[in-house]
Every structure is written in structure tokens, then in C-alpha cells.
Amino acid sequence: MDHSDHSNSRVFELDLLRAMVAVADCGSFTTAASRLNSTQSTVSQKIRRLEEMAGHRLLERGNRDVLPTEAGETLLGYARRMLALNDELQEALSGATVALTVRIGVPDDFATGRTTLQLAAFNRHYPQVKLEVTSGLSRDLSASYDRGELDLVLLKQRQNAREAVACWPEKTRWVDSARNPCIDLDPLPIVTFPPRGVYRDEMIAALEAVGRRWHISFTSSSLSGIQSAIADGMGIGLLPQRAVTADHAVLAKKAGLPSVDAFEVALLHRPAADPMVKELARVLSRVLAQDTKG
């Protein structure tokens, strides 16, 4: 055999290594052949080819069984690792192993409807990506993002409060209870998020600007809590358009309340984010573009 042939033949085929591992594990060519769904002569042939490539005897036939030589033991250690790596590669490509976790933060009013439908569709399309979605108050999501606990966030913020990948104006509506309206009460009861919560300061400033007396009748950090309190007649509130329900009455301009348009929905991820994070950002952008129309 000339040198060039010999150097090329040093690529150890997994098929030959698998035969070697089977014979060593079974201690017999016959048993190894049945385990590999092969014939004894084929297995013997594979071991001979492997011995030629290795340049050493790899197996000794003992009295009762076949045992690896010293060179055989060395080869077996590598063979097992190469076969295990091959299995790992197969699993990774078949999507059996989760390649990436993307941690997303969304405000409560995006934790239902089109947003979750799109996230579920993304999950089906990219099964190797594991999504971890957190919903909550924008100020908490913003803090989590800054601590590096989230990869992608949707935030309600005052316009241009922080730089974003994309942003859309947030349409808000003054709403009252459809069944038990409060708009004519004086002072006017209001339902709101806690201090530093989104909309709260703007609501109060807007009411004072038109000279309405007010008092806070209900505070909740949960959007559903706010929606219910308004519907039940606890007071009026300011809600994003998508959070207005059939139990609410939208207060028209004739109620004398100024429109509040100081907010936007912002989408943030880091510039060096994984391509999957950027792909998910594109998916959410499409939802937001539809959601903030009209």
C-alpha cells in the first residue's frame, strides 16, 4: 500500500467502530453479528479492515471468548466516544434536543389573543426553540430585561422613553361601566394601576387639566382586576383599546375628558441577540403593526 492510500484510509468509519464495540461487549463474533443484524463473516471482515487501518491486532481469541488487546482497548475508548457523538449529532439535528431558550416578556394585555397565537405558531415552526414567556407590569419587565433575565420584551412606555428595535403608538380609551356608569359622580372615582404604574400619572394630570375632582377608588397591578373593577362600576379608567370589553362603555369626547396619547408599545432586544430572537421580534412586529392600526 503506498503512502497516499494509507493516509486516506485513516478515516475510521463508524460502521467498523460499531462492529468492534459490539464484539468487545458481547465477547463473541456470533452474538455481535446477531446484535448488529449482520453475519459473522461480515463482522469478521470489518474487524480485519479495522486492524489493517490501525496497524495492530485489536482482538485476541481466548479460550472461551474474544478479548481486546491493549491497542484494542485504546481504540475502544475512542470508538465509544465517536459513536456517542454521532448519536448526539443525530438528536440535535432531529430537534430532539432544545438548542435555544428564548425568554420573552409581554404586558398583561398582550398575554392573550393574537400574541399568544403567534408565539404558539412560532413554537410549532421552530420546535428546537424553547419559549419562556413572562407577563406582567411594564416597569417589572423593563427591570428584568436590564438585569439580563429576558432576551426580548414588549413594553408600554412614555414615547421615546428608551431606545427600541421598533415602536408603535398605543391607543388608549377612557372607559366606564356599561351597566353602572360613574362619569357623573363628583368627585369622580377612578380605577388605576399602583404608583409608577403605566397611565396613572397621565390620568390624574388629564382630569386636573379639565378641572374634575377625583379620588382613587380601586388600585390593582393586574389588568384583569382593573377591567373587572371598571365593569362593576367602581370607577372610570384609562385602558388600551385592545383591553376594552363588552362590559365597558367608551367615554366619548362629549364626556369632556382629554385624549391621552403619550404612550407607545416598544419592542426591545440586544443588538447581538441570537438570530432566533430577531426572527421572533419580526413575528411580534407583524402582530403589533396589526394591533395598533385603526
Image: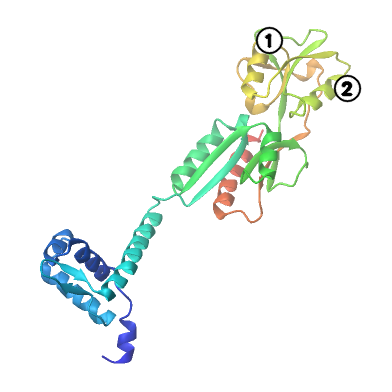
From this view, report whether residue 72 is shown above or below residue 1: above
Q: Residue at x 63, y 28 (%)?
A: 242
Instruction: Name the residue carrying label 2.
Output: 209
Q: Is residue 100 left or right of residue 197?
A: left
State which quarter of the image contains the N terminus.
bottom left
Q: Is residue 96 left or right of residue 182?
A: left
Instruction: Name the residue carrying label 1.
Output: 233
Percent of width and height locating residue 186: 82, 8
Percent of width and height locating residue 214: 82, 14
Give the amino acid at mark 1. Answer: Gly
> Regarding mark 2 in the picture, which secondary structure is present there?
helix
From this view, report whether residue 105 is shown above or below residue 69: above
Badge 1 or badge 2: first in the primary sequence? 2
The 10 Å Cα crowd at callout 1, few under 14, some 14 to 19, many 20 or more, is some
Q: Residue at x 71, y 31 (%)?
A: 171
Q: Residue 226's image quarter?
A: top right
Percent of width and height locating residue 143: 70, 39
Percent of width and height locating residue 50: 24, 76
Mark 1 touches mark 2? (CB < 8 Å): no
The 10 Å Cα crowd at callout 2, few under 14, some 14 to 19, many 20 or more, is few
Along the line of sight, which residue is nearer the eye, 107 or 71? 71
Q: Residue at x 35, y 64 (%)?
A: 81
Give the amino acid at mark 2. Answer: Ala
Along the line of sight, which residue is nearer the eye, 61 or 145? 61
Q: Is residue 138 left or right of residue 96?
A: right
Q: What is the C-alpha distance between the residues marked 1 and 2?
A: 24 Å
